[in-house]
Image (cartoon, rainbow, N blue to C red):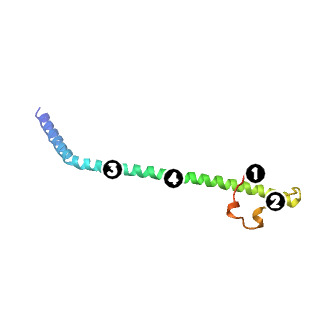
C-alpha cells in the first residue's frame, strides 16, 4: 500500500512538472503556430500567383505552337504550288507578290476575296 502511495505521488509530481512545462511552452507554441499560419498564407498566395503565371505561359506556348504549325503548313502549300509552277502544270501562277519587292504595310495582310 505504501509503495502504491509513493508511485502515485511520483506520478503526480511528474504530471505536475509536465503540466508546468507545457504551460510555460504554450505561449511559445502559440506564437510559433501563428507564425507558421502566416507563412502558410504567404506561400499559398505565392502558389496562386505562380500558378496563374504558369497558366499564361502555357497559353502563349500553345498559341505559338499553333502559329508555327499554321505557318509550316502554309509554307508547304506554297512550296507545292511553286513546284507545280516550275513543272508547268499550273499555268497562270507567276510567283508570290512578296517576291516582286517590298509590300507596303497597308497591303500586307490577309484580304478576303469575293
* SS at circle 3: helix
Q: Earlier in the sequence, mark 2 or mark 4?
A: 4
- Mark 3 — residue? 38
Q: Residue at x 17, y 39 (%)?
A: 11
Residue density around tag 2, few if under 14, some if 14–19, many if 20 or more, within 10 Å = some
Q: Earlier in the sequence, mark 1 or mark 2?
A: 2
Whole-angstrom CA distance, mark 1 to mark 2, is 21 Å
Q: Nearer the viewer, residue 13 or 114?
A: 114
Whole-angstrom CA distance, mark 4 to mark 3, is 24 Å
- Mark 4 — residue? 54
Asked if marks 2 and 4 touch (Cβ < 8 Å), the reply is: no
Answer left or right for 100 relative to 43. Answer: right
- Mark 2 — residue? 82
x, y percentage for residue 78?
77, 57
Answer left or right for 10 relative to 52. Answer: left
* SS at circle 2: helix
Q: Earlier in the sequence, mark 3 or mark 1?
A: 3
Residue density around tag 1, few if under 14, some if 14–19, many if 20 or more, within 10 Å = few
x, y percentage for residue 85?
85, 59
- Mark 1 — residue? 113
Residue density around tag 3, few if under 14, some if 14–19, many if 20 or more, within 10 Å = few
x, y percentage for residue 64?
62, 55
Amino acid at each position: 500500500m505504501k509503495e502504491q502511495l509513493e508511485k502515485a505521488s511520483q506520478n503526480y509530481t511528474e504530471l505536475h512538472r509536465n503540466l508546468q512545462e507545457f504551460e510555460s511552452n504554450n505561449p511559445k507554441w502559440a506564437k510559433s503556430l501563428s507564425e507558421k499560419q502566416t507563412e502558410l498564407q504567404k506561400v499559398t498566395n505565392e502558389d496562386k500567383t505562380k500558378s496563374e503565371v504558369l497558366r499564361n505561359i502555357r497559353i502563349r506556348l500553345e498559341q505559338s505552337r499553333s502559329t508555327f504549325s499554321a505557318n509550316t503548313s502554309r509554307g508547304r502549300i506554297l512550296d507545292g504550288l511553286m513546284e507545280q509552277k516550275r513543272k508547268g502544270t499550273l499555268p497562270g501562277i507567276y510567283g508570290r507578290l512578296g517576291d516582286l519587292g517590298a509590300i507596303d504595310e497597308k497591303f500586307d495582310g490577309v484580304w478576303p476575296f469575293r
